[in-house]
Amino acid sequence: MIDPTLWLVGGLILLGGEMAVPGAFLMWLGIAACGTGLLSLAGLALPVQVMVFAVLGFVSVAVGLRLRRRRAHEFVPGLINLPGSGLVGRQVEVLDFAGGEGRVRVGDSDWPARLAHGMPEPRAGARLRVVAVDGLSLVIGPDTQGG
């Protein structure tokens, strides 16, 4: 039997490692190790402790991946902009354009952009709207909403 303190300390080390090297993976194994330590207080034999850690590790990583997948499809203000995260429909200010490609300003950020099909070349300072997101580039079109 391994002392439950070792599982708890190991779990805390993994949780601390997650803070030092963020990646949301060590956290789940740290939680599994801490859970194993708490369950080991009941006097579980070593093979049972290892099985408990394996099961808790699998379950916690699966939960973490599910949460990560769900969050990747949601718009959360303040997080990195993902396609469809609220950029479409936003007003932009044209900074410069040449040959259908250029840069625009959305809020306080500059973005690479290209014109929607059939759009005439805009002048600097023109106000347009984001009609789509293509990778890291914004596709811009006419500002039909005004203002």
Image (spheres, rainbow, N blue to C red):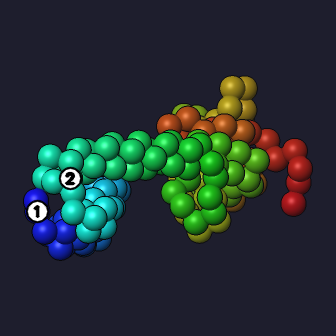
Residue extending farthest top: 117
10 Å neighbourhood of mark 1: few (<14), some, or many (≥20)?
A: some
Please give left or right for residue 49 compared with residue 64 in the image: left
Residue 116 drawn at (x, y percent): 68, 32
Looking at the image, residue 18 sits to the left or right of residue 109; the answer is left
- The image shows residue 142 at horizontal and vertical percentages of 79, 41
Q: Is 100 situated left or right of 5 in this image? A: right
Q: What residue type is labelled 2?
A: Gln
Query: What label does residue 2 carry, if any?
Result: 1
Total number of numbered discs in the rendering:
2
Foreground: 8 or 131?
8
- Labels 1 and 2: the sequence-earlier one: 1
Kind of residue at disc 1: Ile
Q: Residue at x 72, y 39 (%)?
A: 131
- In the picture, the quarter occupied by the C terminus is bottom right
Find out whether the residues at labels 1 and 2 contact each other: C-beta distance under 8 Å: yes
The label number, if any, that marks residue 49 in the structure image: 2
Q: Quadrant of the N terminus?
A: bottom left
